[in-house]
Amino acid sequence: MDGGDGTNESEEAPGIEGTGGYVRTATAADALEVRRILDGAMLEPGDVEPRIAEGSVLVAGDRPGNDRDAERILGTVVLETDGEAGAHVSAIGVRRRHRARGIGRALIDRALDRERRLTARFDEGVRPFYESLSFSIEQVDDQRYRGVAVATDRS
């Protein structure tokens, strides 16, 4: 995680199935992979480079065979920081063949640890994902929902 001094700490994410799973703050070198993952999920978060520069993008991945030099970015979350009110999940995506392995959960867990409060707007299709993460959910209109999670609300 970026400590504000430009350092980029990686934290193990044991909930990710596979070897050497981690979540970390994205760097400029990750921009292309972040865009590919979000494009694959048919999401349009806008220009990710400024969000990466401000430390608002997290990536999750693994190191096959625990090889520190071999890194695969498998998922990402783009946040819109809202000061003391936490952050909004602008986009979250996981490579299709790596879904249902705990990667999305690990990204949200890290974001919530960092921001203490998260909001999200989403369609019915991803409602079960946010429910599984203990988001409080309300229907906004016929097809959209709004979810809120606060760090103290979660087990």
Image (cartoon, rainbow, N blue to C red):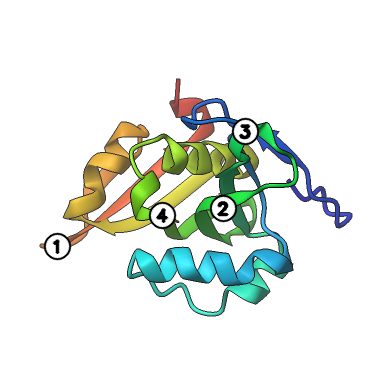
Q: CA distance from mark 1 to mark 4?
A: 25 Å
Q: Is residue 137 above or below residue 40?
A: above
Q: Residue furthest bottom?
A: 47
Q: Amino acid at mark 4?
A: Arg
Mark 3 or 1, nearer chain start? 3
Residue 9 versus residue 153: which sits nearer the camera?
A: 9
Which residue is the site of mark 4? 95
Coordinates of residue 83 in the picture (x, y in percent): 64, 57
Which residue is the site of mark 3? 65
Which residue is the site of mark 1? 143
Mark 4 or 3, nearer chain start? 3
Quarter assignment of residue 128: top left
Q: What residue is rendered at 52% in x and 55% in y?
A: 76
Q: Residue furthest top?
A: 155
Q: Amino acid at mark 1?
A: Gln
Dot 2, crowdedness within 10 Å: few (<14), some or many (≥20)?
many
Coordinates of residue 108 in the picture (x, y in percent): 49, 42
